[in-house]
Image (cartoon, rainbow, N blue to C red):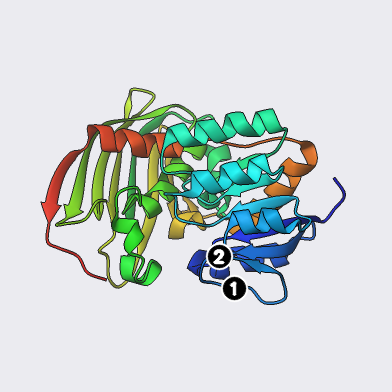
């Protein structure tokens, strides 16, 4: 495919405006050619209300990037693949594992690239953390991922509805990092999920996991944090302690901060997407979503006070 390829951005909300549009504008291999949204619009490109209208228009499009909520995204992605588009999925890649597996099979059959993205894996400290841990024995790890839902998802009622993932929407970012940097396998043994009264998704969660069946890995997720936000991962090894702070942006080894690297999380995603399309490849690592699904399967559910945005 000649470059730049033409992309349609689907779902013009907060994350699209804050992250996707600036990243697309900075990627030489991609040209924003259209926007699709029921309510939002992007200046200087054709705008459509749904994916069907985009397809029916006959506009020359090579790929789509989907920023819609996970529930309902499968149908849009399936239509896009059927129309011959390459597809990039904002995290989480779908509302269920089964629907993403179906999209993988459809992409293979269509000869199109499917990219299930995990933006936090491209934070500045993550790649170096993975390299440092590669030859270490993990003895213990902890994750503290606490943020204010009203700041990061203002008025977004869908996130606390069934399928919206609740606190796992940010929590899956932490899981995407640890599955990328830990050298062995990670699985859940126990979970506690806290649901606000009348809501379909948890607002807090505690996970007890194990790495390679030997090292305990604990996670504390909470959507009710006010003031300073916490996005921290601590990993103890037989050769020292590693910390990732600020969502993976800063890396510390035995208390000494290491040099940061990278071009930014979302710019890195779009560069990777351009590479996948050019190579005719897909990238669909579902380990973070599998851990979330297992937490829902194993989790003890408790109820807390009602929550209002």
Instruction: Report, in whole angstroms, how far the alpha carbon at label 1 lies from the one at label 2.
Output: 7 Å
52, 37: nearer the viewer: 52
Q: Is residue 22 above or below residue 106?
A: below
Question: x, y (%) of residue 239?
Answer: 45, 35
Q: Are marks 1 and 2 in contact (CB under 8 Å)?
A: yes
Query: Seen from this angle, which residue lies furthest bottom?
Result: 43
Question: x, y (%) of residue 74?
Answer: 50, 43
* Helix, strand or loop for disc 2: loop
Quadrant of image for the C terminus: bottom left
- Residue receiving disc 1: 41
Q: Is residue 163 above or below residue 57?
A: above
Query: Horizontal placement of 99 versus 205: left or right?
Result: right
36, 152: nearer the viewer: 36
Residue 262 visible to the viewer = no
Give me the residue at 19% from left, 52% from top: 195
Residue 66 visible to the viewer = yes
* Residue 141 sits in quarter: top left
Question: x, y (%) of residue 144?
Answer: 32, 52
Query: Seen from this angle, which residue lies furthest front?
Result: 56
Give me the residue at 74% from left, 60% from top: 27
Query: Horizontal placement of 114 versus 178: left or right?
Result: right
Give me the residue at 31% from left, 53% from top: 166
- Residue receiving disc 2: 37
Quadrant of image for the N terminus: top right
């Amino acid at each position: 495919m000649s470059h730049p390829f033409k992309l349609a951005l689907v779902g013009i909300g907060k994350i699209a405006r804050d992250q996707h549009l600036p990243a697309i504008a900075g990627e030489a291999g991609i040209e924003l050619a259209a926007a699709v949204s029921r309510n939002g619009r992007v200046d200087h490109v054709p705008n459509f209300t749904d994916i069907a209208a985009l397809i029916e228009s006959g506009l020359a499009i090579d790929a789509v990037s989907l920023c819609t909520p996970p529930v309902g995204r499968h149908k849009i992605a399936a239509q896009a693949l059927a129309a011959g588009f390459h597809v990039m999925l904002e995290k989480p890649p779908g509302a269920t594992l089964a629907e993403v597996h179906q999209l993988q099979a459809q992409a293979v059959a269509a000869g199109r690239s499917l990219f299930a993205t995990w933006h936090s894996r491209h934070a500045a400290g993550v790649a170096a953390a993975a390299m440092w841990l590669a030859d270490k024995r993990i003895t213990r790890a902890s994750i503290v991922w606490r943020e204010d839902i009203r700041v990061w998802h203002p008025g977004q009622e869908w996130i606390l509805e069934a399928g919206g993932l609740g606190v796992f929407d940010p929590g899956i970012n932490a899981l995407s990092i640890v599955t990328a940097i830990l050298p062995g396998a990670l699985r859940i043994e126990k979970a506690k999920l806290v649901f606000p009264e009348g809501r379909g998704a948890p607002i807090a969660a505690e996970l007890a996991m194990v790495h390679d069946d030997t090292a305990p890995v604990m996670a504390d997720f909470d959507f009710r944090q006010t003031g300073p936000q916490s996005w921290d991962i601590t990993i103890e090894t037989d050769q020292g302690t590693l910390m990732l702070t600020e969502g993976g942006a800063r890396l510390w080894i035995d208390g000494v901060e290491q040099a940061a690297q990278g071009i930014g999380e979302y710019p890195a995603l779009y560069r990777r997407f351009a590479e996948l399309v050019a190579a005719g490849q897909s990238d669909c690592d579902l380990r973070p979503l599998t851990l979330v699904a297992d937490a829902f399967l194993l989790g003890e559910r408790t109820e807390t006070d009602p929550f209002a945005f």
